[in-house]
Amino acid sequence: MTPSKPNQERTAPGASSAQDEAQQAGTAQPAGADATSADETAEAVVIDAEPSEGEEADAELSAEEAAEKAIEDLRAEKQAWEDRYLRLHAEWDTYRRRTAEQREAEKARATEKLVTDLIPVIDDFERTIAYADEHGEQGLLDGVKAVYSKLGSVLERSGVVVLNPVNEPFNALDAQAVATVEDSSAYDETVRDVYQKGYKMGMKVLRPAMVTVTCGGPKREPAPAEDADQQ
């Protein structure tokens, strides 16, 4: 029998190796090309990582806005504390003023009863002085006048004002009219006689004066202050 021939010829070992090297040489890139490509890639990454000029400007603007907002917040807080201080200061002044007024009012009320009780005593002094003056008892008159003057000084130092509005315009708040007198020579509603003196302490009338008032005369011209108020 004739031996069969192989389908393909065997390739020599050296030829196969040369062929593989040729294929690898055809597909592989040079070493210099690989280094260049890597540098370009790294540079692109660095460029992408670095912010642009617009991004830097935005970052700086955001920082300035944040700083301005912080400053505005501090200013608002400072203004709020100043307003609170001024409000508390005004409230304290109001409280102090009201307290002082209350103390003065309490002081006045504490002495009102004493003064009210002394008023009839003053009336008795005045009647005694009038009697002694009419009947010529000079010794008694001098002694009573001295005591009366001393008592009047004490009351005056305590803030008591004597209401004796002779020839003054009638004031219904300080005086009580017990009679009217026809008198065309005097202004209308002028106090003619004071039957009993009145007393006032502070803004409170302890006792109004008992007076007579004229009528039938010319009307009194208004005071300049009243004219200014009307205008």
Image (cartoon, rainbow, N blue to C red):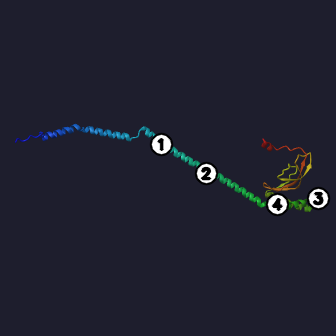
Element on which disc 4 rests: helix
Do we see residue 145 in this rendering? no
Query: Quarter of the image holding residue 200?
Result: bottom right
Quadrant location of the C terminus? top right
Disc on the earlier residue, 1 or 2: 1
Residue closest to the far front: 1
Residue pointed to by mark 2: 84
Q: Nearer the viewer, mark 4 or mark 1?
A: 1
Disc on the earlier residue, 4 or 1: 1
**Total marks drawn?**
4
Tell me if label 4 and label 1 are in contact, CB under 8 Å: no
Q: Nearer the viewer, mark 1 or mark 3?
A: 1
Q: CA distance from mark 1 to mark 2?
A: 33 Å
Do we see residue 229 in this rendering? yes
Q: CA distance from mark 2 to mark 3?
A: 72 Å
In this rendering, position of residue 90 left or right of residue 191: left
Q: Is residue 102 above or below residue 26?
A: below
Element on which disc 1 rests: helix
Crowding around mark 2 (Cα neighbors within 10 Å: few <14, some 14 to 19, many 20+) is: few
Q: CA distance from mark 2 to mark 4?
A: 47 Å
Q: For residue 62, which numbered disc appears in the image?
A: 1
Query: Quarter of the image holding residue 111?
Result: bottom right
**Callout 1, which amino acid?**
Ser
Q: Nearer the viewer, mark 4 or mark 3?
A: 4
Residue pointed to by mark 4: 116
Q: Nearer the viewer, mark 2 or mark 3?
A: 2
- Residue at horizontal 77%, vertical 59%? 109
**Callout 2, which amino acid?**
Arg
**Callout 3, which amino acid?**
Glu
Q: Give the x, y percent position of residue 128.
A: 90, 61
Q: For residue 134, which numbered disc appears in the image?
A: 3
